[in-house]
Image (cartoon, rainbow, N blue to C red):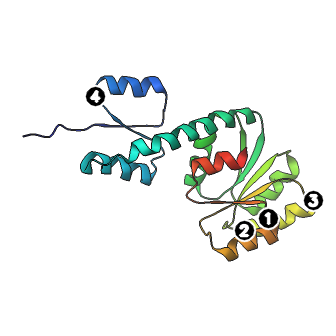
Amino acid sequence: NITPTEFVLISAYEQQNIINSAKEIGINYFIPKPINPSVLNDTLSDIFLGTHKLQQQLHTQDNTNTLRRDVTTLKGSKILLAEDNKTNQEIIIGLLEHSGIIIDIANDGIEAIDKFKNNDYELILMDLQMPNMDGYEATKMIRKQNQNIPIIALTANAMKEDIQKTKQAGMNKHLNKPIEVEKLYKTLL
Protein backbone atom coordinates (compact mmCIF):
# COMPACT_ATOMS: atom_id res chain seq x y z
CA ASN A 1 0.00 0.00 0.00
CA ILE A 2 1.88 3.07 -1.29
CA THR A 3 1.30 6.39 0.46
CA PRO A 4 0.77 9.19 -2.08
CA THR A 5 3.51 11.82 -2.19
CA GLU A 6 2.50 15.15 -0.72
CA PHE A 7 3.70 18.33 -2.42
CA VAL A 8 4.23 21.60 -0.56
CA LEU A 9 4.20 24.92 -2.41
CA ILE A 10 6.80 27.36 -1.07
CA SER A 11 6.52 30.90 -2.39
CA ALA A 12 6.98 34.56 -1.48
CA TYR A 13 3.75 35.26 -3.37
CA GLU A 14 0.68 34.60 -1.31
CA GLN A 15 -1.98 35.45 -3.90
CA GLN A 16 -5.14 33.39 -3.60
CA ASN A 17 -5.13 32.49 -7.34
CA ILE A 18 -1.69 30.81 -6.95
CA ILE A 19 -2.94 28.83 -3.93
CA ASN A 20 -6.14 27.89 -5.81
CA SER A 21 -4.16 26.75 -8.89
CA ALA A 22 -1.91 24.65 -6.63
CA LYS A 23 -4.98 23.03 -5.01
CA GLU A 24 -6.41 22.20 -8.47
CA ILE A 25 -3.32 20.13 -9.28
CA GLY A 26 -3.32 18.44 -5.87
CA ILE A 27 -0.95 20.60 -3.80
CA ASN A 28 -2.68 21.02 -0.45
CA TYR A 29 0.04 22.70 1.57
CA PHE A 30 1.47 26.19 1.22
CA ILE A 31 4.41 27.76 3.10
CA PRO A 32 5.02 31.50 2.59
CA LYS A 33 8.56 32.90 2.38
CA PRO A 34 10.44 33.94 4.47
CA ILE A 35 9.86 30.50 6.00
CA ASN A 36 8.62 30.56 9.57
CA PRO A 37 10.05 27.53 11.48
CA SER A 38 6.76 27.06 13.33
CA VAL A 39 4.72 26.89 10.08
CA LEU A 40 7.24 24.44 8.58
CA ASN A 41 7.03 22.28 11.72
CA ASP A 42 3.21 22.31 11.71
CA THR A 43 3.08 21.47 7.98
CA LEU A 44 5.38 18.46 8.44
CA SER A 45 3.45 17.43 11.54
CA ASP A 46 0.14 17.55 9.60
CA ILE A 47 1.60 15.52 6.72
CA PHE A 48 3.49 12.86 8.69
CA LEU A 49 1.49 12.64 11.93
CA GLY A 50 -1.99 13.54 10.67
CA THR A 51 -2.40 16.46 13.08
CA HIS A 52 -4.60 19.42 12.11
CA LYS A 53 -2.42 22.24 13.36
CA LEU A 54 -2.72 24.27 10.15
CA GLN A 55 -6.52 24.24 10.31
CA GLN A 56 -6.27 25.68 13.81
CA GLN A 57 -3.98 28.35 12.41
CA LEU A 58 -6.37 29.43 9.65
CA HIS A 59 -8.07 31.76 12.10
CA THR A 60 -4.70 33.30 12.97
CA GLN A 61 -3.86 33.51 9.26
CA ASP A 62 -7.09 35.47 8.62
CA ASN A 63 -6.10 37.85 11.40
CA THR A 64 -2.64 38.36 9.83
CA ASN A 65 -4.23 38.95 6.41
CA THR A 66 -6.53 41.60 7.90
CA LEU A 67 -3.57 43.32 9.57
CA ARG A 68 -1.61 43.02 6.31
CA ARG A 69 -4.41 44.91 4.54
CA ASP A 70 -4.65 47.48 7.36
CA VAL A 71 -0.92 48.24 7.09
CA THR A 72 -1.51 49.55 3.54
CA THR A 73 -3.36 52.49 5.16
CA LEU A 74 0.13 53.67 6.21
CA LYS A 75 1.16 54.10 2.55
CA GLY A 76 3.54 57.04 2.14
CA SER A 77 4.64 56.99 5.80
CA LYS A 78 8.40 57.29 6.13
CA ILE A 79 10.23 55.15 8.67
CA LEU A 80 13.87 54.61 9.55
CA LEU A 81 15.18 51.09 10.08
CA ALA A 82 18.44 51.13 12.07
CA GLU A 83 19.74 47.57 11.71
CA ASP A 84 23.22 46.29 10.79
CA ASN A 85 22.19 42.74 9.86
CA LYS A 86 21.45 42.46 6.12
CA THR A 87 19.15 39.44 6.57
CA ASN A 88 17.04 41.26 9.16
CA GLN A 89 16.90 44.32 6.88
CA GLU A 90 15.63 42.13 4.03
CA ILE A 91 13.04 40.38 6.23
CA ILE A 92 11.54 43.66 7.48
CA ILE A 93 11.57 45.20 3.98
CA GLY A 94 9.94 42.00 2.66
CA LEU A 95 7.21 42.10 5.30
CA LEU A 96 6.42 45.72 4.46
CA GLU A 97 7.02 45.87 0.71
CA HIS A 98 3.28 45.58 -0.07
CA SER A 99 2.42 48.43 2.32
CA GLY A 100 3.72 51.46 0.46
CA ILE A 101 5.67 52.52 3.57
CA ILE A 102 8.94 54.27 2.65
CA ILE A 103 11.85 52.65 4.50
CA ASP A 104 15.29 54.21 4.92
CA ILE A 105 18.09 52.04 6.28
CA ALA A 106 20.87 52.98 8.70
CA ASN A 107 23.58 50.36 9.30
CA ASP A 108 24.59 51.67 12.73
CA GLY A 109 23.69 54.24 15.38
CA ILE A 110 25.81 57.04 13.91
CA GLU A 111 24.15 56.64 10.51
CA ALA A 112 20.73 56.55 12.25
CA ILE A 113 21.35 59.93 13.94
CA ASP A 114 22.63 61.42 10.69
CA LYS A 115 19.60 60.22 8.69
CA PHE A 116 17.24 61.33 11.46
CA LYS A 117 18.67 64.89 11.32
CA ASN A 118 18.22 65.10 7.55
CA ASN A 119 14.80 63.49 7.12
CA ASP A 120 11.29 63.65 8.44
CA TYR A 121 10.41 60.19 9.82
CA GLU A 122 7.20 59.11 11.52
CA LEU A 123 8.81 56.19 13.35
CA ILE A 124 12.19 54.54 13.97
CA LEU A 125 12.83 50.80 14.28
CA MET A 126 16.06 50.63 16.30
CA ASP A 127 18.22 47.53 16.68
CA LEU A 128 19.98 47.49 20.04
CA GLN A 129 23.25 45.78 19.10
CA MET A 130 25.01 47.66 16.30
CA PRO A 131 28.65 48.49 15.55
CA ASN A 132 30.12 52.02 16.03
CA MET A 133 27.16 53.15 18.14
CA ASP A 134 24.46 50.91 19.62
CA GLY A 135 20.72 51.52 19.67
CA TYR A 136 20.65 52.75 23.27
CA GLU A 137 23.15 55.55 22.60
CA ALA A 138 21.56 56.52 19.29
CA THR A 139 18.13 56.72 20.97
CA LYS A 140 19.47 58.94 23.77
CA MET A 141 20.98 61.32 21.19
CA ILE A 142 17.77 61.41 19.12
CA ARG A 143 15.70 62.02 22.26
CA LYS A 144 17.75 65.17 22.98
CA GLN A 145 16.37 66.62 19.73
CA ASN A 146 12.94 64.98 19.58
CA GLN A 147 10.83 63.65 22.45
CA ASN A 148 7.86 62.57 20.35
CA ILE A 149 9.01 60.33 17.50
CA PRO A 150 8.09 56.69 18.31
CA ILE A 151 11.23 54.55 18.63
CA ILE A 152 10.73 50.78 18.64
CA ALA A 153 13.54 48.57 19.97
CA LEU A 154 14.47 45.50 17.91
CA THR A 155 16.19 42.88 20.01
CA ALA A 156 16.89 39.19 20.36
CA ASN A 157 17.05 39.74 24.15
CA ALA A 158 13.68 39.88 25.83
CA MET A 159 14.94 39.85 29.41
CA LYS A 160 13.18 42.11 31.92
CA GLU A 161 16.33 44.21 32.41
CA ASP A 162 16.66 44.73 28.64
CA ILE A 163 13.08 45.99 28.44
CA GLN A 164 13.81 48.28 31.39
CA LYS A 165 16.98 49.55 29.71
CA THR A 166 15.11 50.35 26.46
CA LYS A 167 12.54 52.38 28.45
CA GLN A 168 15.28 54.31 30.24
CA ALA A 169 16.93 55.12 26.90
CA GLY A 170 13.62 56.60 25.74
CA MET A 171 12.20 53.84 23.55
CA ASN A 172 8.44 53.38 23.33
CA LYS A 173 8.05 49.71 22.53
CA HIS A 174 9.89 46.50 22.04
CA LEU A 175 9.86 43.96 19.17
CA ASN A 176 11.61 40.63 19.62
CA LYS A 177 13.71 39.00 16.93
CA PRO A 178 12.96 36.92 14.98
CA ILE A 179 10.25 39.44 14.08
CA GLU A 180 6.67 38.15 14.32
CA VAL A 181 4.61 39.41 11.39
CA GLU A 182 1.47 40.15 13.42
CA LYS A 183 3.39 42.00 16.13
CA LEU A 184 5.21 44.14 13.56
CA TYR A 185 1.96 45.13 11.82
CA LYS A 186 0.14 45.80 15.12
CA THR A 187 3.03 47.91 16.42
CA LEU A 188 3.18 50.02 13.25
CA LEU A 189 -0.59 50.53 13.24
* Residue depth check, mark 3 versus mark 4: number of the one nearer the observer: 4
**Disc number placed over residue 145 in the picture, else none:** 3
Whether residues under marks 1 and 4 lie with C-beta atoms below 8 angstroms apart, the answer is: no
Judge whether 167 appears above or below 58 on screen: below
For mark 2, what is the residue?
134
Q: Please state the horizontal and vertical placement of residue 7, each as a whole percent of the image.
A: 28, 37
Q: Badge 4 local density, few (<14 within 10 Å), some, or many (20+)?
A: few
Whether residues under marks 4 and 2 lie with C-beta atoms below 8 angstroms apart, the answer is: no
Left or right: residue 149 compared with residue 67? right
Judge whether 172 appears above or below 120 on screen: below
Q: Please state which amino acid type lies under the numbered disc 1.
A: Ala
Name the image quarter holding residue 54: top left
Whether residues under marks 3 and 1 lie with C-beta atoms below 8 angstroms apart, the answer is: no
Alpha-carbon span between mark 2 and mark 3? 18 Å
For mark 4, what is the residue?
26
Q: Measuring 79% from the left and 63% from the top, which residue is drawn there?
A: 171
Q: Badge 3 local density, few (<14 within 10 Å), some, or many (20+)?
A: few
Q: Please state which amino acid type lies under the numbered disc 4.
A: Gly
For mark 1, what is the residue?
138
Whether residues under marks 2 and 1 lie with C-beta atoms below 8 angstroms apart, the answer is: yes
Instruction: Check disc 3 and report its element: helix, strand or loop.
Output: helix
Alpha-carbon span between mark 2 and mark 1? 6 Å
Alpha-carbon span between mark 4 and mark 2? 50 Å
Instruction: Check disc 2 and report its element: helix, strand or loop.
Output: loop
Q: Please state the horizontal and vertical placement of residue 178, each as a whole percent of the image.
A: 55, 58
Q: Please state which amino acid type lies under the numbered disc 3.
A: Gln
Q: Please state which amino acid type lies under the numbered disc 2.
A: Asp
Instruction: Check disc 4 and report its element: helix, strand or loop.
Output: loop
Dot 2 or dot 3, earlier in sequence: 2
Left or right: residue 90 compared with residue 168? left
Left or right: residue 63 compared with residue 17? right
Dot 1 or dot 4, earlier in sequence: 4
